[in-house]
Amino acid sequence: MIENDTIKRILYVDLSRRRFWVEEDEDLFKSYLGGAGVAIQLLHKECPKGIDPFSPDNPAIFTVGQFNAIFPIASKMVAMFKSPLTGNLGESHGGGRSAIAMRMAGYGALVIKGKSETPVYIAIHDDDVHFRDASVLWGMSSSYTVGRIIREQEPGSGIRTIMRIGRAGEQLVSYACLITETYRHFGRMGLGAVLGSKKVKAIVISGKRSFKFKDQKLYRQTYKEIFKSLVESPLMKKYHELGTSMNINPLNERKVLPTKNLKDNHFDLADEISGEAFAVNYLGRRVACSHCPVSCIHIAALREPYESEPYFYKTNMISYDYELIYSLGSMLGVGSSRGLLKLMDEVEIQGLDAISTGVALAWATEMKERGYLSEKETFGLNLKWGDYENYIKAIKLIVEQPNDFFRFLAKGVIQASSKYGGTEFALAFGGNEMPGYHTGPIAYVGFITGARHSHLDSAGYSFDQKFKAAGKNLVPQEIANSLIAEEKWRQILSSLVICFFARKVYTPEIVSKAYLVLEYDLVYDDLLKIGEKILKSKYDFKTREGFRFDELKIPHRIFELETLFGKISKDVVKRSIKKFKDEIENL
Amino acid sequence: MAKRLSVIDVDLCVGCQCCMFACNRRFAEAGLSRSAIHIKSVGGFERGFVVTVCRACSDPPCARVCPTNALVRREGGGVTLHMNKCIGCQNCLKECDIGAIFWDKNMNKPVICVYCGYCVDFCPFDVIKLESIRGE
Ligand code: SF4
Ligand code: SF4
Ligand code: SF4
């Protein structure tokens, strides 16, 4: 570790007593690097076994890594907590200005404990920590407004992060997110609700530091090398041109785009909601997270006329990505790009996870279609594929929860289906709603087994495509090994904390080289051992909180439709999970 | 001929702040405390960004208020800072209307663009450029 590195400083905030203090733990960051590695250790330590996710004792832990603010595209922050959605490990990554702001404020980790009696927002500017009253912000109808108000109150323009929850978090929707800088999110697993339960409306962080190195030349040279490959390499091109939404058309053409609650794998209107269509018709601006030259964030400009006033328009700026187009678009049969943008906007206003919201509404729509629900449950809404106006109303109802049905829907599709039926087409894995890849068995094994339940866990969807291209057989042992090997390495990237989009640039060689700048001598094998330890800690936590590989339920729907490999064999999936379990237990 | 940093087209800026980190790396240090260029949003990411950096004024007000002549007018415009003479009074900081003087808290000295152009190579979208200015 470089001299005077502030990464070892952990800022504790106790909301119940309105206290804060800093503890230093150099060894922790030496052994576990930072990010995910440190977060899981802190979670083991700070989260009492078996607690309710909304207990004041459930900590909200934020961590950054040693590469943040030192090397480019190390631009993410990791959050860990006990998830209200799955009841076990909650891990979520966010970008924007969050990671750089925390590193520059001089902390490696922030642990928020306890519960405030009245709404607060926490403002951290270098060594100062303030508990600011947020009564006025609480209950505000739009997360955009909350951001705007805080922007005017707080210093640090340009270098600060403003992370806030929407109404969904206040109302404890199990998949409420934490929004950073309006367009990035700690999306999955319900961090927004955990903060809502603590009465934390927002967290602002800013600071300006610098770090020195013994080998200055090596630093500048290594930096340049990484920067150059980020800017010049074709590997990053897709992210900065069309962005992740460029995936819509190819996945649709290959018939692996989940559509209408996965009743179909192909969406007739995909063209209208493709990355190409959005870029040509709506793209208003591209922006970047701090210290990232790729700028994958695509923001659409939607001009809407006022009904009451002729020639009056408002222009909404709405960020879009592949996962939103899938979950709120094809999954709900929404083929109108305008309608889809309006849905995305509502999700942002309320502060929900877009994937879970879309999947929950897709399940509800099929329930309605089959006559399993009446308009009494849906509160008068006639949910229909493609009817985005009704979906916008439904999103508001998920947050308001005016009846039992919406109270259950706000807990996620597993809880809702266990009460109202339709479990065979409730598309969640281990409690978490599925991302947009019906590529084949490996994707699903990944969703089910993944430590934090996201498509970014172990790249199953990408293995499906690779196995298919290589004409490989689906051997369960090989599936398990591939996923685990990938996941071990991803622990390193998410401990540094590198944006996964740059995973092909940050090869083991580059990471080892960059570590030399930080005065560590870590070769690939050392790194993998650390990755393995981190992975093991995650499953230890999950198991501690009741996760069992043997009890995982798989919705039958996924076996009904063709994938890249034809219909998925239940047997392959089950045996792969078993192998995965054996490998994890042997770690 | 004297050089200065100019902003070619601020609408191309994505707010990545790679220029800010580059400027700080002039000292082979990582971070922001010694950066002489600052990028912030116009008020929310959706409205774009503002680039704040020394404009190399021909009659720099910051130099005029420096009591020790640590900050002197440079031939062709802009200023040169003589660190050893600076007493950290922050007069210059207050005088620059566009806020292009930053403060290095550790050293208690101003941070001002030295017109070196190091940042230019790290702007992925060619927002900034080093240009020659005509002296009088
Ligand atoms: S610091 Fe400000 S006043 Fe001084 S030369 Fe630069 S822009 Fe002009
Ligand atoms: S020209 Fe040099 S001193 Fe000025 S902002 Fe760029 S890197 Fe910094
Ligand atoms: S490097 Fe270029 S695009 Fe990035 S913030 Fe600076 S001026 Fe803007």
Image (cartoon, helix red, strand yellow):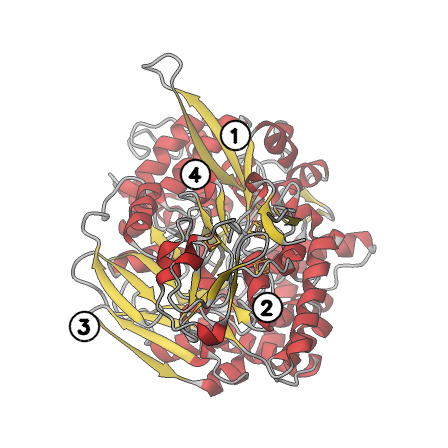
Q: Is residue A451 left or right of residue A566?
A: left
**Numbered marks: total:** 4
Answer yes or no: is residue A433 visible. yes
User: Do callouts 1 and 3 mark residues in contact (Cβ within 8 Å)?
Assistant: no
Task: Please tell me how crowded label 1 is: few (under 14), some (14-19), or many (20+) other residues with Cα within 10 Å.
Answer: many
Q: Which residue is the extreme one toward the top?
A: A310
The image shows residue A534, relative to residue A558, as above or below, that is below
Q: Give the Cα separation between the discs numbered 3 and 4.
A: 40 Å
Answer yes or no: is residue A459 visible. no
Q: Nearer the viewer, mark 3 or mark 2?
A: 2
Determine which residue is flagged by label 2. Answer: B25
Determine which residue is flagged by label 4. Answer: A361
Determine which residue is flagged by label 3. Answer: A17
The image shows residue A323, relative to residue B29, as above or below, that is above
Image quarter of residue A226:
bottom right
Image quarter of residue A73:
bottom right
Q: Nearer the viewer, mark 2 or mark 1?
A: 2
Q: Amino acid at mark 3?
A: Arg
Q: Amino acid at mark 2?
A: Arg
Q: Chain of mark 3?
A: A
Q: Give the Cα separation between the discs numbered 4 and 1.
A: 12 Å
Q: Nearer the viewer, residue A510 or A430?
A: A510
Q: Amino acid at mark 1?
A: Val
Looking at the picture, do discs 4 and 1 lie on one chain? Answer: yes
Looking at the picture, do discs 2 and 1 lie on one chain? Answer: no
Q: Give the Cα separation between the discs numbered 3 and 2.
A: 41 Å
Q: Chain of mark 4?
A: A
Q: Give the Cα separation between the discs numbered 1 and 3.
A: 48 Å
Determine which residue is flagged by label 1. Answer: A334
Q: Give residue A171's position: percent from left, percent from top.
A: 27, 49
Q: Chain of mark 2?
A: B
Q: Nearer the viewer, residue A393 or A362?
A: A393
